[in-house]
Image: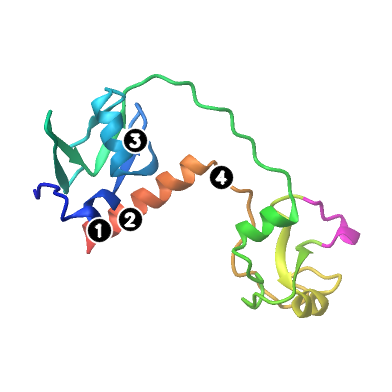
Amino acid sequence: MKPISQYEPEVLRQSVVVFSQNYLPVGQIDIKRAIALLITGRAEPLEMLSQQTWQIISPQLVLQVPEHIRLTLTKSERFWRVPPVARREVLRRDNHTCQYCGSNKKLTIDHVIPRAKGGLNTWENVVIACESCNHRKGNRTPQEANMPLRIKPKAPMHPTVAFAEKFWRSQQENNSG
C-alpha cells in the first residue's frame, strides 16, 4: 500500500470496478468517484476480490480504497431496450469491419438472408459488408456464395451485461495465467 501524495498524481487516475448490490459488475469509475461513494456511504469496499488497495491520506481521515467496491444504495435499474436496427448501431456492433473479409473501406449493410428470399431487417440478419463483398455475395446466402461470416450476427446486449462478461473473462485470464 502506497500513500498518495502530491508527487504521485498517477494514482488518482486509477480505476475501480463497481458492483451492484447483487454483486454484478456494472462499470468502472475513477478513484476520485470511488472515494466520494465510499465517504458518503453509497458504496462499501469489496476487499475479498481486491488484490490492490490504495491508501488515501487527508487532514481529516485515512481511507483504504480497494480496486472493487459494491454499491449500497437501492435504486431500481432503468429499463433497457434493444435498439432498433440502424446503420450506425450495426457499424458499432460489427466494429466498422466487413464481416466477410475484414475490410473497413466502403462499408454497406448486407442482409445475410436476402430480403428477396424472405430475409428480415433484424439484428440476426444484418451485417456490415464492404461493397465488393456485398456485390460478390449478391442475392445469395453466405453458404450459397461460399462466403462464411466471421461472427454470427446478434442483437446488442445490455451494457451492464456486456461489462460483466468482459470483467469475468479478464478475471479468468488473470487467474489462469
Mark linked to residue 174: 1
| Element type at mark 4 | loop
Residue on which disc 2 sits: 170
Dot 1 surroundings within 10 Å: few (below 14), some, or many (20 or more)? few
Along the line of sight, which residue is nearer the eye, 42 or 142? 42
Q: Give amino acid for label 2.
A: Ser
Residue on which disc 4 sits: 157
Q: Are marks 2 and 1 in contact (CB under 8 Å)?
A: yes
Residue on which disc 3 sits: 19
Q: Give amino acid for label 1.
A: Asn
Dot 4 surroundings within 10 Å: few (below 14), some, or many (20 or more)? some
Q: Earlier in the sequence, mark 3 or mark 4?
A: 3
Query: Mark 3 to mark 2: distance in Å?
Result: 15 Å
Q: Give amino acid for label 3.
A: Phe
Along the line of sight, which residue is nearer the eye, 57 or 162? 57
Residue 50 appearing in the image: yes
Q: Give amino acid for label 4.
A: Met
| Element type at mark 1 | helix
Q: Earlier in the sequence, mark 3 or mark 2?
A: 3
- The answer to whether residue 154 is above or below residue 164 is below
Q: Is residue 75 left or right of residue 150?
A: left
Query: Which region of the structure is painted magenta?
Result: 114-121
List x then y, in percent, for residue 71: 33, 28
List x then y, in percent, for residue 82: 65, 40
Q: In this view, does 101 lie to the left or right of 27?
A: right
Q: Looking at the rendering, which quadrant does residue 104 occupy?
A: bottom right
